[in-house]
Each structure stands twice: as C-alpha cells, then as structure tokens.
Image (spheres, rainbow, N blue to C red):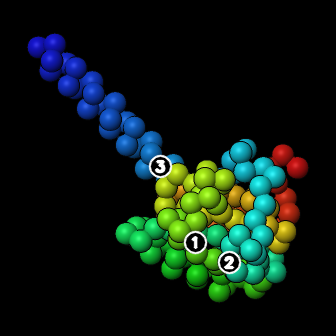
Amino acid sequence: MTGLVVCVLVLAAASAYGVLQRRRSGRVRVRGRDDGKRLDAAELGAELGERATLVQFSSAFCAPCRATRRILGEVAGMVPGVTHVEIDAEAHLDLVRRLDILKTPTVLVLDADGRVVRRATGQPRKADVIAALGEAVGGTRPGQ
C-alpha cells in the first residue's frame, strides 16, 4: 500500500512539474542575468537590425525551431528595421555558454545597440514577440 501512495505522489508531482514547464515555455520575459549583455555583428555573423534584432538559437533536430523560424521571419518582415538572425547552437558553443542558452529554441530580442532586452525559451507566440519588439524599439524597460 505504501508503494502505491509513493507512486501516486510521484505521478502527481511529475504532472504538476510538466504543466508548469509547459506554461513557462515560449514566454517572452526579461531575465535579470541578461542585463547589460550585448551582442555585435561579429558575434552574430550578421548585421544588427536598424531598430531591433531577433536572435534565434537553434539545433539541427529541433522541431519547434522550424516553427519559431517561421514566426520570427514573419514578424521581422512585418516590422521595418527588424532583422531575424538564426544561430546554430552547436556551432557556437562559446556564445551559448556566455549567454546561458540551455535549450533550443531560445530567442533573444536585441535593441538597436545589441543589448538583450527580452528572452524566450521554447517556441514563442507571435503576439509575445511583437510586444517584446515594442519594448526593444521603444526603449522602455520594466520599472522605468
């Protein structure tokens, strides 16, 4: 009987963890550890956007990366001065480590100066990307 109770508790905890992870995945949010981090054209392998840059870290066998590529490409095409840059995480491990990229896709929203303004882990929603771009282009940060 004790084994059954333990099994039920483990199943409940695993389910709760799974629900929490699914809700957090893809959310575009500010992360304190990104404050002050900046990327330039040399690190990206492409020029920064005139107003903002959407940087996507991907890997070869990542299905959500393909959908994220499509979403970011659409958003960059809609907003003048915004560029989408995709980086192969496996080929740029030093950058991945420096930016603390833990899974793919991870999307960084950079302002015109290359500062990380927002970050999303997992496939972001189009509306969230557009809202994050508004912050990057407008130059407002939470608490300002």
- Looking at the image, is 118 positioned above or below residue 43? above
Label 1 neighbour load within 10 Å: few <14, some 14-19, many 20+ = many
The three-letter code of the residue at mark 1 reads: Ile
Task: Find the distance from the CA under tag 3 to the CA under tag 1.
Answer: 25 Å
Closer mark to the observer between disc 3 and disc 1: 1
Q: Residues within 10 Å of mark 3 (few under 14, many from 20)?
A: few
Pointer 3: what residue? 23
Residue found at the very far right of the displayed protein: 144
Q: Position of residue 138 (x, y in %)?
A: 84, 67
Compared with residue 17, is residue 132 higher up or lower down, i.e. above or below? below
Q: Position of residue 24 (x, y in %)?
A: 51, 49
Residue that carries the numbered disc 1 in the rendered image? 87
Instruction: Tell me whether the residue at label 2 lies in contact with that at label 1, contact meaning CB atoms closer than 8 angstroms.
Output: yes
- Quick one: label 3 or label 2, which is nearer the N terminus? 3
| Label 2 packing within 10 angstroms: few (<14), some (14-19), many (20+) | few
| Residue identifier under label 2 | 45
Instruction: Check the image and report above or below for 111 versus 47.
Output: above
Compared with 91, 77 (above or below) is: below
Q: CA distance from mark 2 to mark 1?
A: 8 Å
Q: Which numbered circle lies on residue 122?
A: none
Mark 1 residue element: strand
Q: Residue at x 45, y 42 (%)?
A: 20
